[in-house]
Image (cartoon, helix red, strand yellow):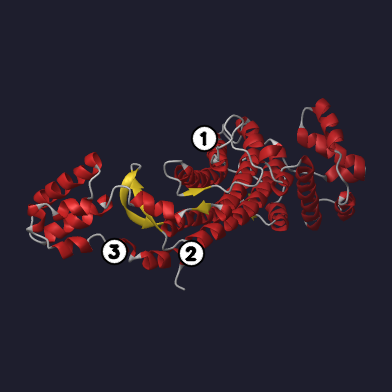
Amino acid sequence: MIPRYARPEMTAVWDPATKYRIWFEIEAHACDAMADLGVIPKENAQAVWKAKDVQFDVARIDEIEAVTKHDVIAFLTHLAEHIGSDQARFVHQGMTSSDVLDTTLNVQLVRAADILLADMDRVLAALKSRAMEHKDTVRIGRSHGIHAEPTTMGLTFARFYAEMDRGRARLVNARAEIATGAISGAVGTFANIDPAVEEHVCKQLGLTPEPISTQVIPRDRHAMFFATLGVIASSMENIATEIRHMQRTEVLEAEEFFSPGQKGSSAMPHKRNPVLSENLTGLARLVRMSVTPALENVTLWHERDISHSSVERAIGPDTTITLDFALNRLAGLVEKLVIYPDNMLANMNKFRGLVMSQRVLLALTQAGVSREDSYRLVQRNAMKVWEQGADFKTELLADPEVTAALTPAQIEEKFDIGYHTKHVDTIFARVFGQG
């Protein structure tokens, strides 16, 4: 991923030096386990740990790989340069490259998940804070982009909180599902290595032994992991799209914070654009881009082929780095979002009471008018608002068929905004819990 959309902590997870450190730990822990089983001499296992504080030379490994055309062999050769060929002769005994590669990938994905979970906690905290702040800030709800009925800005934030909270729960499950390791040999049968070695290595790395592997860990686990990231990205885009809509000049119910000295356009000095939200929409596409390849990686030939490898070398770092950056950008955007309650009220009243049409419809049916006639009476008065700019309540009060069923006081009562917000506390309790 390009540095523009990368943060140091997540980038470090995928740094080659990090990868080689995990490779070393896998090999060293495996030697310890084999020594405990009496398979290799204890002094050889102890000798491997002489490289514990070594900074593995990435350039040197690349140089060796240029000859061997095999990354794990290049690393093992470099390790032997540090601990001596004789001491290294039992390293990787009974193991296959995928034992190292797959276990390492899952360690990296677990670490990435932990960072992403912390990112989501920041997003959730921001959404909850803004929800509480604007719990009773009335705005118009929209369906199909058209005015529907009143809601509150707090409910909008609460809805996004609930969605992101579900995403976090999915990521917790995806982290648990990906946290497996395999040290099971060439086709997963443990023919040349004892299962106890796998158990020891996994325990040391905070993983669970894969119940049954082939040469690789099953890729349905990875597919679920990346699919989860894709869903989180879509939820992120859902929030960003709402903000983009609210910032439209004709709406202007909220806008991204515009910092001193910030410029909106090279041509038009007046511009204040929703650039962060638009950027998040694009970043969401990049995250989702990994989902289909991850799903296709599930299908491999027999005990393993290499078709998944190139995909994972790209989507592992790119997807987690991108989502990490995007979630932090989203959190900052929500934290500093500028909200305009007066504009929300002005927008809601733009069509002069029209948004109360359902209340009038229901009142007419309760007064004994058929639903078909009630709908006809309400709609014909509503159309005058749309087409002539009339006042909805005024038109209703002047309609003899309406006033034959409802008194002026009953009509007046149907325009109380508080009617639409009376259950906000109940919804908040469902989302955030009591108290």
Residue 314 lies, in percent from the top left, at 65, 35
Residue 292: assigned label: 1
Q: Hey, what amino acid is under mark 3?
A: Tyr
Residue 125 lies, in percent from the top left, at 56, 60
Q: Hey, what amino acid is under mark 2?
A: Met
Q: In this view of the protein, which residue sits in the foreground, 237 or 208?
A: 237
Q: Which of marks 3 and 2 is nearer the N terminus?
A: 2
Report whether residue 182 is seen: no
Q: In this view, does 195 lie to the left or right of 399?
A: right
Q: In this view of the protein, which residue sits in the foreground, 164 or 226?
A: 164
Q: Nearer the viewer, mark 2 or mark 1?
A: 2
Q: In this view of the protein, which residue sits in the foreground, 195 or 243?
A: 243
Residue 419: assigned label: 3
Q: Is mark 3 on a helix, strand or loop?
A: helix
Q: In this view, does 22 lie above or below 360?
A: above
In the picture, which quadrant includes the N terminus? top right
Distance of label 2 from label 1 (alpha carbons): 38 Å
Distance of label 3 from label 2 (alpha carbons): 20 Å
